[in-house]
Image: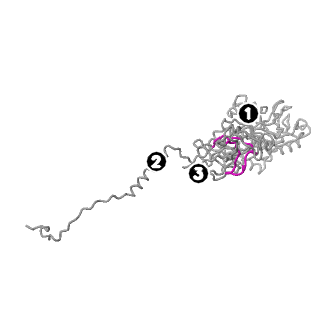
């Protein structure tokens, strides 16, 4: 058998190993890891126990508000009735302005004028020129492109407008035919002249005598609405309505309004606004107001002083109130808060224009009970004029955390005193540019359910690109902010 190598090893070559005592080393990496782990645990606990704040960057913008209304147009309309029986022929077109004494229409008792006119048209083939036909064709194309099958009443409106256009085009032919009649036939044609100046229209609908305050919700039911055209009627009897005259350029549009939009108008104290008519995109200025009708519903009333002639043939009009034309700083409503302040007369505040060094002199006492004064650093958040023109009645809004009710303040360079007691509130937001919540006053111009437009570059307000607290309800003054 083979011997192992150990059996042939020389005893002299065998080395003795001494056992050494093991040293204890500090594991720096483990300690660092433990510290970081504890820090992370503490941060997680603080995170779940705190309310992290989200910021919002203030930018210039405008509101998107649905301010489209469909209203009833009310004018100073007078219905004129016929004095005679016979065939009626008009000389004035729809929407034309007339003066007192202008010829409006003629009543042909025997029909001789009508017969002569038909004979003239038959011999010439047509009483309309090529330009007249092009105008009618263009109107028909426009109607076809805008036709809505769900609104069949527009067909009758189109028919009415075509009849009015034809009337205007044929008026010269009627006048020429009238001049060609014999003296005997002419004597049986009664010419009627305008008794008052104004704009002529040729329809009735029962709204002529209505006022804004007398309207009720049933008046806005267009299904039940009936518009009776007066043109296209050949025979009239004495007492029949033959035309209307609108005697004033002042007119009103009344529309139902919901509570939310009414509150928006009231809140923003809107008394005048730009109004866009949707049928032709024309924009004009109007005064606006709100009122409650006899049926208890709330209505919007828009008063105009011009451009009535453009819409004299329409009873119902679609308009849009352009309330967001004035741009400003757009902020979310959730960032708006109301905060109380002390009202301190301006004469008692030193260095009020300085952000960090405004101060007041307050009565104090030493440990020995001796009366003295102390300078208190305060921050000015706004100012307001008093009830009179005297500077003594002007006040600064001072943070109520710097002072207490009952504190005695000394007037600068005077022995006059003021007791801290008056309080008032400001509407504003919390600015977080510096890492802590700092109240800033705002002036709201417009608002909807989600956003408001506020004035920019005000003395104590916001500027574009400022950061504000998104949820003001979760913030207190001087809170340190982290996201």
Which residue is rendered at x = 42% and y = 51% of the image? 37
Question: Which of the two labelled residues, at mark 1 and mark 3, occupies the earlier sequence position?
Answer: 1
| In this view, the mark in front (1 or 2) | 2
Give neighbour class at mark 1: few <14, some 14-19, many 20+ (Cα, 10 Å): some
Give neighbour class at mark 3: few <14, some 14-19, many 20+ (Cα, 10 Å): few
- Front residue of 439/13: it is 13
Q: Percent x, y for residue 366?
A: 66, 43
Q: Percent x, y for residue 340?
A: 66, 40
Mark 1, residue position: 291
- What label does residue 115 carry, if any? none
Q: Is residue 154 magenta?
A: no
The alpha-carbon separation of the residues under discs 1 and 2 comes to 60 Å
Callout 2: helix, strand or loop? helix
Callout 3: helix, strand or loop? loop
Give neighbour class at mark 2: few <14, some 14-19, many 20+ (Cα, 10 Å): few
Q: Is residue 343 magenta?
A: yes
Mark 2, residue position: 42
Q: Percent x, y for residue 445?
A: 70, 44
Magenta region, residue range: 336-365
Callout 1: helix, strand or loop? strand
Q: Is residue 121 above or below residue 228?
A: below
- Front residue of 130/428: it is 428
Mark 3, residue position: 435
| Residue found farthest to the top | 295
Question: Which of the two labelled residues, at mark 2 and mark 3, occupies the earlier sequence position?
Answer: 2
């Amino acid at each position: 058998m083979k011997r192992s190598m150990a059996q042939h090893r020389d005893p002299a070559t065998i080395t003795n190993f001494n056992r050494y005592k093991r040293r204890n080393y500090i594991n720096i990496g483990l300690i660092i890891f433990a510290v970081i782990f504890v820090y992370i645990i503490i941060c997680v606990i603080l995170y779940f126990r705190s309310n992290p704040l989200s910021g919002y960057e203030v930018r210039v913008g405008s509101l998107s508000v649905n301010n489209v209304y469909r209203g009833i147009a009310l004018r100073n309309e007078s219905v004129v009735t016929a004095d005679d029986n016979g065939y009626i022929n008009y000389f004035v077109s729809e929407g034309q302005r007339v003066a007192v004494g202008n010829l409006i229409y003629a009543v042909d008792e025997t029909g001789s004028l009508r017969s002569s006119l038909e004979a003239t048209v038959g011999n010439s083939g047509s009483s309309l020129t090529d330009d007249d036909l092009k105008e009618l064709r263009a109107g028909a194309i426009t109607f076809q492109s805008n036709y809505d099958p769900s609104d069949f009443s527009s067909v009758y409106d189109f028919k009415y407008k075509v009849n009015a256009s034809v009337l205007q085009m044929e008026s010269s032919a009627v006048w020429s035919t009238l001049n060609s009649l014999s003296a005997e036939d002419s004597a049986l044609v009664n010419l009627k002249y305008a008794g008052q100046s104004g704009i002529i229209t040729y329809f009735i609908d029962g709204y002529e005598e209505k006022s804004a305050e007398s309207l009720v919700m049933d008046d806005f039911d267009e299904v039940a609405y009936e518009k009776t055209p007066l043109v296209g009627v050949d025979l009239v009897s004495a007492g029949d309505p033959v035309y209307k005259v609108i005697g004033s350029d002042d007119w009103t549009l009344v529309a139902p309004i919901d509570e939310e939009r009414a509150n928006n108008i009231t809140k923003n104290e809107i008394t005048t606004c730009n109004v866009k008519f949707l049928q032709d995109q024309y924009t004009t200025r109007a005064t606006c107001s709100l009122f409650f009708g006899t049926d208890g519903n709330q209505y919007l009333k828009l008063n105009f002083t011009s451009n009535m002639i453009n819409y004299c043939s329409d009873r119902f009009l679609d308009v849009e109130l352009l309330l967001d034309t004035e741009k400003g700083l757009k902020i979310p409503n959730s960032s708006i808060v109301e905060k109380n302040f002390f009202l301190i007369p301006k004469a008692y505040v030193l260095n009020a224009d300085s952000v960090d060094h405004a101060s007041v002199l307050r009565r104090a006492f030493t440990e020995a009970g001796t009366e003295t004064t102390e300078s208190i650093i305060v921050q000015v958040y706004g100012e307001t004029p008093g009830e009179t023109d005297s500077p003594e009645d002007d006040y600064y809004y001072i943070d109520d955390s710097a002072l207490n009710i009952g504190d005695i303040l000394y007037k600068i360079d005077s022995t006059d005193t003021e007791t801290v007691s008056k309080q008032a509130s400001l509407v504003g937001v919390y600015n977080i540019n510096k890492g802590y919540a700092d109240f800033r006053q705002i002036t709201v111009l417009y608002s909807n359910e989600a956003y408001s437009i506020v004035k920019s570059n005000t003395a104590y307000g916001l500027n574009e690109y400022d950061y504000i607290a998104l949820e003001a309800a979760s913030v207190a003054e001087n809170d340190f902010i982290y996201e």
